[in-house]
Image: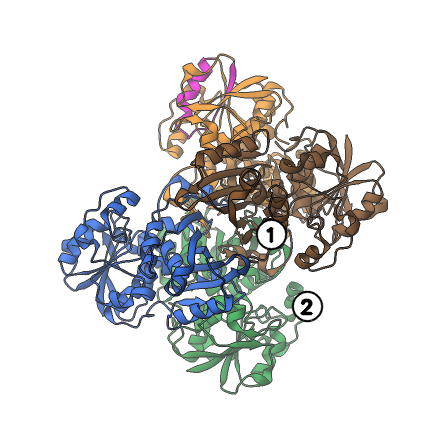
Chain colours: A blue, B brown, C orange, D green
Amino acid sequence: MMNVGIVGISGYSGCTLLELLLKHKDVRVTYVSANNTKGAVSEIWPHLLGETELHCEPFDLTKIADNVELLFLAVPHTVSMQIAPKLLEAKKRVIDLSGDYRLKNTEDYEKWYGTKHLDDKNLNKAVYGLPELFREDIKKANLITNPGCYPTSAILGLAPLLATHGKEVQSIIIDAKSGVSGAGRKATLPFSFGEVNENFKAYKVLNHQHAPEIDLYLSKITDKPVSVNFVPHLLPINRGILSTIYVQLNEKISLEEMHKVYKNFYKTEPFVRLLPLGSQPELKNVARTNYCDIALATNPNQNLLVITSAIDNLVKGASGQAIQNMNIMYGFKETESLL
Amino acid sequence: MMNVGIVGISGYSGCTLLELLLKHKDVRVTYVSANNTKGAVSEIWPHLLGETELHCEPFDLTKIADNVELLFLAVPHTVSMQIAPKLLEAKKRVIDLSGDYRLKNTEDYEKWYGTKHLDDKNLNKAVYGLPELFREDIKKANLITNPGCYPTSAILGLAPLLATHGKEVQSIIIDAKSGVSGAGRKATLPFSFGEVNENFKAYKVLNHQHAPEIDLYLSKITDKPVSVNFVPHLLPINRGILSTIYVQLNEKISLEEMHKVYKNFYKTEPFVRLLPLGSQPELKNVARTNYCDIALATNPNQNLLVITSAIDNLVKGASGQAIQNMNIMYGFKETESLL
Amino acid sequence: MMNVGIVGISGYSGCTLLELLLKHKDVRVTYVSANNTKGAVSEIWPHLLGETELHCEPFDLTKIADNVELLFLAVPHTVSMQIAPKLLEAKKRVIDLSGDYRLKNTEDYEKWYGTKHLDDKNLNKAVYGLPELFREDIKKANLITNPGCYPTSAILGLAPLLATHGKEVQSIIIDAKSGVSGAGRKATLPFSFGEVNENFKAYKVLNHQHAPEIDLYLSKITDKPVSVNFVPHLLPINRGILSTIYVQLNEKISLEEMHKVYKNFYKTEPFVRLLPLGSQPELKNVARTNYCDIALATNPNQNLLVITSAIDNLVKGASGQAIQNMNIMYGFKETESLL
Amino acid sequence: MMNVGIVGISGYSGCTLLELLLKHKDVRVTYVSANNTKGAVSEIWPHLLGETELHCEPFDLTKIADNVELLFLAVPHTVSMQIAPKLLEAKKRVIDLSGDYRLKNTEDYEKWYGTKHLDDKNLNKAVYGLPELFREDIKKANLITNPGCYPTSAILGLAPLLATHGKEVQSIIIDAKSGVSGAGRKATLPFSFGEVNENFKAYKVLNHQHAPEIDLYLSKITDKPVSVNFVPHLLPINRGILSTIYVQLNEKISLEEMHKVYKNFYKTEPFVRLLPLGSQPELKNVARTNYCDIALATNPNQNLLVITSAIDNLVKGASGQAIQNMNIMYGFKETESLL
């Protein structure tokens, strides 16, 4: 059994990590921390009463045992870049679920996250933890920057197209809808029940920090820079992201052919399910799973491809994907604790 | 006091009509009918206990008193076109909330509604009841075809642009999200609580019967045929439609200028609220109102305009708009019972 | 038109007061305040855009015009007792929606609200604003203490029984379930969407500050002290309280007779609807109304009476009842702006 | 690996059975049936795409392979009693999740289920599958009648008290609140999203068919007949039952002592979690688990004990408990696939 730790156990991602790792055959969680709370994990998360005896306290590098090999950072951005360098120096491997290491340019980081980057040194070493695209790099990485929830759904939805028909892509619109856990667990008025329930809205229209992340990694799989139009919306549900993606192509497309392209691209992937033509993904079908469900439709008269892509933002969009990355890094069965 | 009737009181639109008309200063509901139920309206709708003594029974033309001047048809499509001709012959005016008279071509109707049209004669006499565009025609109409809920939000969101910059419009995508009451009140598995709650999905992708309706009426306000890409989604809430509309333009746009165009277009409209730049509509802000809230955003680098448009599908998207039409037809204050 | 003010416009009760008063024929809101926010009311509450030009700022007695006759205090407890004495001294009448003046004993107040009472002088002058029981006192009151939401549903459910069969009552259990707006509009983790949605729990079991309020006013209508067992629960909905009340009687009861007692007790009340035997109240039937819906059932073998009582906590449980009180105080039509 | 079958795969309980059994180390599902649908299970339940290759067709005894040892009947009442006798005759063991074999008296069955019982012969052989009370009988049973969801939460909440202090119990009130999946998966108006969402109500007040079931099994663990007052309510959530149970005792009780009694009673039970004094169960803490969380509180002045008991109605209240029973019957680890 390998020992791992979770930094940020009081958030939804930290909790989901623990839930999944408690079922993992090869891994044991021996360290958990949180900054604003301490005590038994089963007091913070009463649903885990009887399932864990772990206690948490504020993060303290010196309290992490030598035999802890890997740490998951399930903390807000800006916190990760303060902790990660120390852990890496102490020869721990790190999977960071925050946004701190996703953009590869300190100016972009400052522009989109509103604060200076503090760990320029590791920024370019961090490997983007999207296994379907970067599995080989993940194997050897010491620092994984786990993808954002929106980017996971968007990039998985677009990757087969851009990898094979990048030149024909004229413009991309991503109309994404997320449940509230995507925003973390926090005490703010906009995320109070009375404001979210029976409501729906767009926010950060064309101005969300996940847009440059999507651009960056899509550009890596095609031969020209990609610049998407990204509009997120807030759904009155706990979990799940559905991205409806509109791609304007500059030539005719055949739906059946495109379906084959996608089928082929993901044929060995355990967590991407391409739906049969005519079906559409539903958030309840991916809830509490590591799956990404994808469907295709077209308006051939206008050369428009409509891709719908659904994930659970806390699993494939965060903690499940982080564990998938760990499984790859250590040669565990890739689906362990995830199927 | 003018006497009116509601055909289809057991549905959500019929009920909303009654709720609003009970507050109307100039109108009294004296006839209500429903096909599958009979008895006191307050038994069908217990929240109206003490508010109405009306009883309902199956529709029967001979039971409608001579002094009933107008009938609202809040029935499923195919039913309206069987009832409306008889009412018109009996010299009643009719406001039909179904889809039966919206498309102006029996082939289109058959294609999208899957059944033959039975009232060709009145099809072209029916006036499309969207006051912001067709107020003058509404005044004189004997048969109003009340707009669909999706088309109301989409057309109001697009009309100022198409009326003033139609030539520059290259393509239109409407990503619409609706609460469940848009589908009516019915006992089907896909609309059961267990299937809809904590779920979200697209449906009838690029294939919804409201698309040709949007095309038809948008074409009337610009000088070329319009063909939108329309993708509806089902929200786990009772009421409301938010349409996020993406317009690809073939030249640069200024957000501020476009905002002025919209401001000007709707400046005398009592029920369209153009939000200040930077704000976004939320469904809770239009719930149980006859408002349509609209906001604009742009990606100037790609000549993309993003219009968000929110209504309550049962009010501005159905019953409220029907009453607004009635107010216009009879010279009542246009906002009576709606503000 | 009479001028009134609302202190605490940024909360749900303050907002509901304004929504209702905007429709009131005899009253105009000319003053609104909030402590943590300022600016146009339509910025705090965007759904009121176009409906009001009011601006709010922090409460300041000197800014309230002489012609403002009445103030509604829709503020948290402890705030009211600091403001009310000054307003009364300035010859304003006051309707307080907080808990500050409900218990008539400073020790009880300290015990249940955890802080010393600061306005002993006015405590006993405050009239409990439950019109169905204290209408005559309300007419003459200068300070109304508006009932709590739970007590309104509980007392209206129990009053006819206690007024007529008080001696036979052996014990009372109130199992109450409330939507989240009962807790006010606040940014706390327990009321965040992620914690409340798809959840349900009891809280403050046998230990809620509304229990002594219920005891106090029930005792006034029977001839012995009443001590209820009160267990509140949190429902994942925005609005509404359903109280299921179990009364152990010490002799046989006839359901039909009891129904007559209730029917008679409330026969002239505009806002209490006794449901027919066999029906049960539902929260959706009282949502956004000032009604209290009540039903009765019995287990005759065990002399048990089961009373179910439903209100909208923001209307009959707060703002609607406050306006009903105002209507009584000033001789307006009691149902004005409420039906 | 043992082979088992599920009759009624298209319902929520059938689906939950399959989800759990797919993770079971000792069991393989090789037969599934449903009456109104056929085809791939992953078409009926798209979330299981890629997880199972099972196909279903209408129930047919002759199609069940000889090596299928056990069948779960996840069908509506009246269907089970037609199928079970045939399966028993064919030497299969049966776990029936319907209500058909719970009441031990055909007159009671007819009274509460409204139809004649068709399998008198097996009625008294069926063992009530509540492991915490009847584990020894379960081991040897060929026919298990799996407890109802409400009875599971109620009986587990009351058993320690009745087993130890039965004589002191004067009366019992069970105020239960259930999510919609308790009613099964069906297309009816009262369970449509629009009717359930943002609503709450009591139903079948003192008149629900689970009341005699609770009475029957509680009577078995105390020395006098028990007759509870049972009032169920419908919660606008998918899963979970919280029962708030009020027990009037005829002598003083100590909360601490009662807590010890419960602690002791359940000390070896893997699925009952007695919460620390001061805590309360929440439905989200038992969702998708086989746990029953229980808490105690008292009003010592009135000798009233308040027990709150929470389960997931589809797991401990149905399918999880059925698997727990199977594990006991076959000597598998009792928690297999459930923890």
Tag 1: residue type?
Answer: Ala
Q: Are marks 1 and 2 in contact (CB under 8 Å)?
A: no
Label number found at residue D115: 2
Whether A83 is drawn above or below B30: the answer is below
Q: What is the span of residues highlighted in magenta in the rendered image?
A: C68-90
> Is D114 included in the stretch rendered in magenta?
no
Left or right side of D267 for C251: right
Q: Chain of mark 2?
A: D
Locate residue A267, reporting x and y percent.
40, 72
**Mark-to-mark CA distance, 1 and 2:** 50 Å
- Asked if residue A152 can be seen in this view, the reply is yes
| Place of residue B302 in the rendered image (x, y in percent of width and height, measured from the top left) | 41, 46
- Residue drawn where x is 13% and y is 57% of the image: A89
Residue at 29% x, 61% y is A129
Question: Residue B211 shows which numbered tag?
Answer: 1
In what quadrant of the picture does the N terminus of chain D appear? bottom left
The image quarter in which residue A325 lies: bottom left
Percent position of residue C36, x then y: 38, 29
Q: Choose between C126 and A180: the one closer to the eye.
A: A180
Count neighbours of disc 2 (C-alpha within 10 A) and say few if under 14, some if 14 to 19, many if 20 or more.
Answer: few
Residue nearer the viewer, B225 or D327: B225
Between C287 and C144, the residue placed more toward the observer is: C287
